[in-house]
Image (cartoon, grey):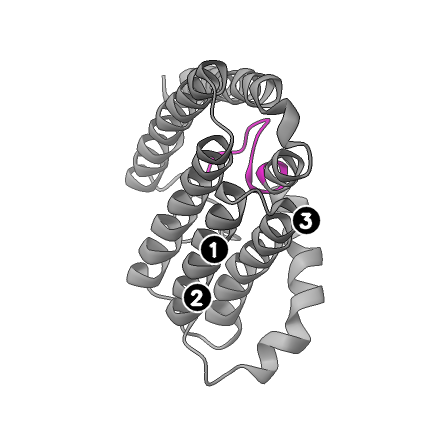
């Protein structure tokens, strides 16, 4: 929901660092972020929650840095964008799984299953729609991501905040996962309504 308005602020904050890293490949940053995400999931599994939180935030910083590097130093590529989104989705799955695996219960595994199912449907809701928008050339001229990502209630910024809450309040995972699942399904409904209006 806040991704687009916050992107300019994020770029302004990250610009000084990105300018000094002209020799670094954006894809390398994406892969480093993947390693950090897996370490965050491992810390969550080991119930080292503050470390999991810190590593999650670092992962998200690196996720913002790779795209900024690509744009700032004219290193944008379709392959780089593809690697970026793949590493993001590994991170989005690994941390919730690590949290539940480290402190399992039937209720938590069910909440996790429903949440991951919502991610699965949500992915289809924006990726297929993004492909249609590209096909129809309905993307805006200011698009800064590899493909158009139609906005909704839950986006990248909201996911950063909510996953951070997961790591800081692991005793409440069942209810937190359930609430987030509901919000993701609301986002899916938003996109469906938007698509009906724009595409028909």
* Residue ID for mark 3: 6
Q: Residue at x 46, y 85 (%)?
A: 23
Q: Residues within 10 Å of mark 2 (few under 14, many from 20)?
A: some
The percent coordinates of residue 160 (x first, y second) are 60, 42
Residue designated by label 1: 39
Q: What is the distance, in whole Å, between disc 1 and disc 3 at their CAs?
A: 27 Å
Left or right, residue 193 beside residue 164: left
Residue at image mark 2: 32
Q: Secondary structure at mark 3?
A: helix
Is 48 in the magenta? no
- Mark nearer the N terminus (1 vs 2): 2
Q: CA distance from mark 1 to mark 2?
A: 11 Å
Along the viewing direction, whichever of 99 and 64 lies nearer the viewer = 99
Q: Residue 61 falls in which quadrant of the image?
A: bottom right
Image-based side of 193 in relation to 27, left or right: right
Q: Nearer the viewer, mark 1 or mark 3?
A: 1
Task: Tell me whether the residue at label 3 lies in contact with that at label 2, contact meaning CB atoms closer than 8 angstroms.
Answer: no
Is residue 157 part of the magenta span, yes or no?
A: yes
Boundaries of the magenta span: 149-159
Q: Principal SS element in the magenta part?
A: loop
Query: Residue at coordinates 53% horizontally, 33% vertically from top-left?
Result: 151
Report the quarter where the N terminus lies: top right
């Amino acid at each position: 929901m806040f991704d687009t308005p916050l992107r300019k602020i994020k770029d302004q904050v990250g610009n000084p660092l990105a300018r000094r890293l002209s020799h670094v490949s954006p894809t390398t940053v994406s892969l480093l972020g993947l390693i950090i995400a897996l370490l965050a999931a491992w810390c969550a599994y080991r119930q080292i929650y503050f470390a999991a939180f810190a590593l999650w935030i670092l992962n998200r910083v690196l996720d913002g840095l790779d795209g900024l590097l690509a744009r700032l130093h004219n290193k944008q590529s379709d392959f780089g964008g593809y690697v970026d989104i793949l590493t993001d989705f590994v991170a989005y799955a690994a941390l919730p799984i690590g949290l539940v695996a480290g402190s399992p219960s039937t209720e938590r595994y069910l909440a996790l299953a429903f949440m991951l199912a919502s991610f699965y449907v949500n992915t289809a809701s924006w990726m297929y729609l993004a492909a249609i928008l590209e096909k129809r050339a309905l993307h805006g001229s200011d698009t800064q991501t590899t493909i158009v990502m139609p906005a909704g209630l839950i986006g990248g910024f909201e996911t950063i905040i909510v996953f951070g809450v997961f790591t800081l309040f692991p005793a409440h995972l069942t209810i937190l996962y359930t609430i987030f699942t509901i919000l993701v399904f609301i986002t899916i409904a938003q996109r469906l309504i938007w698509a009906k209006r724009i595409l028909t």
